[in-house]
Structures are given as structure tokens and as C-alpha cells.
Amino acid sequence: MQWTPALAAHVPRLATAFAIPRTIPSKRGVLLSFDDGPHRQGTPAVLAGLARAGAPAVFFVVGEQVVRYPELVREIAAAGHEIGVHGYRHQTRREWTRGLLAGDTRRALDAVHEAGGPRPRFYRPPHGVFSLGGLRCVRSLGLEPLLWSRWGRDWEGRATATSIAERATTGVRAGDVVLLHDADHYGAAGSWQKTAAALPRIFDQIAAAGLEATSVRDATENRGRLGGPIRGPQSPVALAVVP
Ligand SMILES: [Zn+2]
């Protein structure tokens, strides 16, 4: 995996330049997002935690995992959560041609469709890496890019339920999108257990801030598409590098 922490510092500026949403328009809502699944144990554990809190979320699923666990895609959707796509192969897109990216994204959409899932609205690239061509490509496929404004760093081996909850919620604000993972396919082994264990504390902290977990549907009702027209430099740009 490519790991370039320095790039993370550029995320807000570049995401703004590319008009890629990192937050949602909500006065009280916080959106929890779970990447890298489905996972045989991690997805049910996270679904159970969300159900206990009565909270909605968005799951950015990976096509190559969708074909392994199609029933979990149906479970996510049946529980009322949104399904986004996180590519078919979980690889950095920085050097990919438009044709490769389009093929991979279509394959991921097909996998969700064949699993019986709803048509995804959102796209988040593996490692958070977008190129301008890639951004145009996913938009041409009818997908909206969505990054994140906070994360739990739950993919790290040293993460604990407490550290995940603290990172995810310290200073949390309305409209924040929180990046978490319901799978350890591309992160530290067993990381989903700590993520699932962090959920009660995350919900407590969100409530303590006077906020609530919301769905992107509720947040964008009557507001149309997130983000705006694509601007920015013509060269490929990496926005972030995370699992
Ligand atoms: Zn990922």
C-alpha cells in the first residue's frame, strides 16, 4: 500500500479546488461512513452497532468483496443504509487510465446490482486518491464523489476502541463525514472489532455535542447533488492516502 501522510495535509485544499464534497449540508447531522466491506464478521458487527443506536450510515463497498458476500450487501440495504462504491479492485487510481477506471467502476456497480443492492449514488476511491480524469469519469457514470472530514484511523494496528472514538468525534461538527471501516481486508487484522466496539462511544460523543447521526438522504433532501462543477489543475492529483 502506498502511504504518504504528507498528502493528507493537502486534502482540504485540493478537495475544495476539485469541488469534491468532504461534508454534508446538515445543521445537526453527522454522517458515518464505513469503507472496505463487506466483511463476513465486520459488517454484521457494525450493522448491529448501528441498529442498537438506531443510526443510519453509508457503506462504501468494494466490488471484489461484494462478489464474495453478496448477502451482506442485501443486509446493509435492508437495514436502510446507503451503499456507495469503493471500486472493484482496492488499488490506488492515481496512475490508472480513464478506460481502466471506467471498467473497474462499472464492474463494481455491476457487482452491487447482481448482489441485489440498490444503484449506488456515491463513489469514494480506494486510498482517497482521485485524478481529475478519474473524477470526470466517475461523474460521467452518474456517481457523486464523497470524501470525509474526520476519521478514526481504525485501520492502524495500534488503534483502540477509545482512540478510534476520540479521533472520530473530538470537535465533531454538524455536517462532518466520518471515515471508518467495517472490514480488515486492507487494514490491520481484526480492526473491525475495535471499530464496532467504538460505536457506542462515538454515538455518545455525537449526542453530547448536540448532534445526531444522519443519512445522506435526509441531509440532501431537496438540495440535489453535493459539490459543484469540476475546476482545478489538469494534472493528476492525489487527495489522500488511507485504506
Ligand atoms: Zn479503502
Image: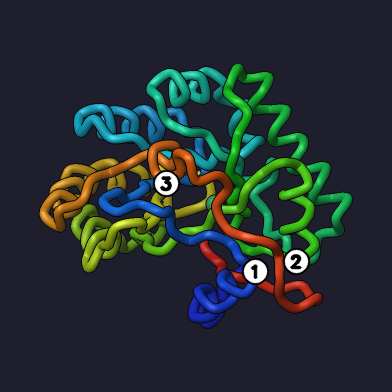
Q: Which residue is mark 1?
A: 18
In x, y percent, where is residue 212? 23, 45
Residue 233 image offset from top left, x and y in percent: 75, 78
Q: Secondary structure at mark 1?
A: loop
5 lies left or right of 235: left
* Disc number placed over residue 174 in the picture, else none: none
Residue at the far front: name it: 222
Which amino acid, mark 3? Ser
Mark 3 and ligand 1: say if the CB distance to the nearest ligand atom is below 8 Å: no
Cβ of mark 2 under 8 A from ligand 1 = no
Callout 2 crowding tier (Cα within 10 Å): few <14, some 14–19, many ≥20: some
Residue at far left of view: 208
Q: Residue at x 79, y 50 (%)?
A: 101
Whole-percent x, y for residue 152 in the image: 34, 59
Residue 232: name its quadrant: bottom right
Three-letter code, disc 2: Leu
Q: Which amino acid does the dot numbered 1 rest on?
A: Phe
Q: Does the rendering let one see residue 56? A: yes
Residue at horizontal 55%, vertical 52%?
226
Mark 1 or 3, closer to the camera: 1
Q: Residue beneath label 2, please?
A: 132
Residue drawn at the location 62% of the way across and 20% of the way down: 115
